[in-house]
Amino acid sequence: MSLDLRTISGATGQRRASGAAAGDETSLPGIIGCSPALQEVIRTTRRVAPSRACVLIVGETGAGKELIARAIHDLSPRSTGPYIRVNCGALTESLLESELFGHMKGSFTGAVDNRTGRFEAAHAGSIFLDEINSTSPKLQVKLLRVLQEGEFERVGDNNTKKVDTRIIAATNRDLLEESEAGRFREDLYYRLNVVPVYLPPLRERREDVEPLVLFFLQRYAEQNRREMRKVHPEAMRLLREHDWPGNIRELQNYVERAVILGTGTELRVEDLPPQLRGQTPPRPIRPRGGSTDLSALCSELVRQGVRAAGPSSNDLYDRIVGRVERELIQQVLQQCDRVQIKAAARLGINRNTLHKKLSEFRLDESGAPAAGGAENGDGHDHPVGEGPAPSPPTESESPHDED
């Protein structure tokens, strides 16, 4: 049975719109979804909005950070004041400084008039600084001063100006990691991070895919005067299972493409792009904030391995765990100069267990550079697969042996 926009999306959208207008704690204006992860974001947003605190929104590109920032402003006592948005990653340092703080006539080439900056324009309102991680160290000093003192000078001016502006910042990077790497001031990070709001990527809240698809289907069907109002169940399944490296922005583009290129009243599998139909390999997912956190990398590795294997696969353990184990043994052998006893100690396993794994993965027969060396009892090295067989394990060796 097809998913019908008129019976599902319409009722959900009307309920959420009326709930948001009535102050429903489970929704926000412009935010679509019902997953537990999104509900936590909504609760945090509603609690912080009435305050004066700085808010740092962390999330991948395309996840909807600007919608959260706008909701914070609209639900705050400053909602009648201006809401100013600045993309810090779109301008050079000099242009961004002038954009934020304004400049005086003649302060640099091209400054033909005095100009009011965005902080002045946002007085008594809110300013949203997107991609705050893109700012230079010089600008970070000025931003810190505005946050702490509420004052600054225009470029080329000595007169100090005072402003009352709430700062909402957003980043797609881990600012603490950026700070540790020397690219972001630690004091500015802690000043911005009064109330952090982490917006999970779409792949971590798959329950939100269906209402988002139906919402965008209605929007683009109306805009393009198409009758497409339903989604085939198999098409919806593929949409739910996609990893969405581009998040909501990617989903929005795919739905618009399907409406424009599709024929008939139903969004079908053939209307979806090749990468959703498994005809091109999926893009690797970058962990949150560009992090190299091992648990995040493992999670993505398993997710993509399961997806690549397909729903009918019955060898997931060998396909994923076996490959990782083989690669680990290969690399550790290389680091240990191909000496088995050293590699076993580094891996934390018994030497006989390692020997068994080498045979299981055929590393002792492949002749690959990773096929390491074994050290026998007399202190001499033998290439893997050659020389005398290892002696039986002693009692001191056996605690690590899983077999």
Image (cartoon, helix red, strand yellow):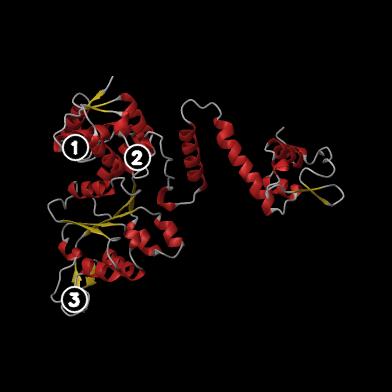
Residue, disc 3: 110
Would residue 304 appear left or right of 349 to someone viewing this image?
Answer: left
Q: Amino acid at mark 2?
A: Leu
Number of numbered discs present?
Answer: 3
Q: Position of residue 154 (x, y in %)?
A: 21, 73
Residue, disc 2: 202
Q: Position of residue 237 (x, y in %)?
A: 35, 28
Secondary structure beneath label 2: helix
Secondary structure beneath label 3: loop
Q: Please report whichever mark, 1 or 2, sits nearer to the chain's N-terminal start.
A: 2
Residue drawn where x is 69% and y is 44% of the image:
348
Q: Which callout, 3 or 1, points to the residue nearer the camera?
A: 1
Instruction: Give the vertical position of 212 relative to 194 (above or below).
Output: above
Instruction: Give the vertical position of 117 relative to 175 (above or below).
Output: below
Secondary structure beneath label 1: helix
Residue, disc 1: 220
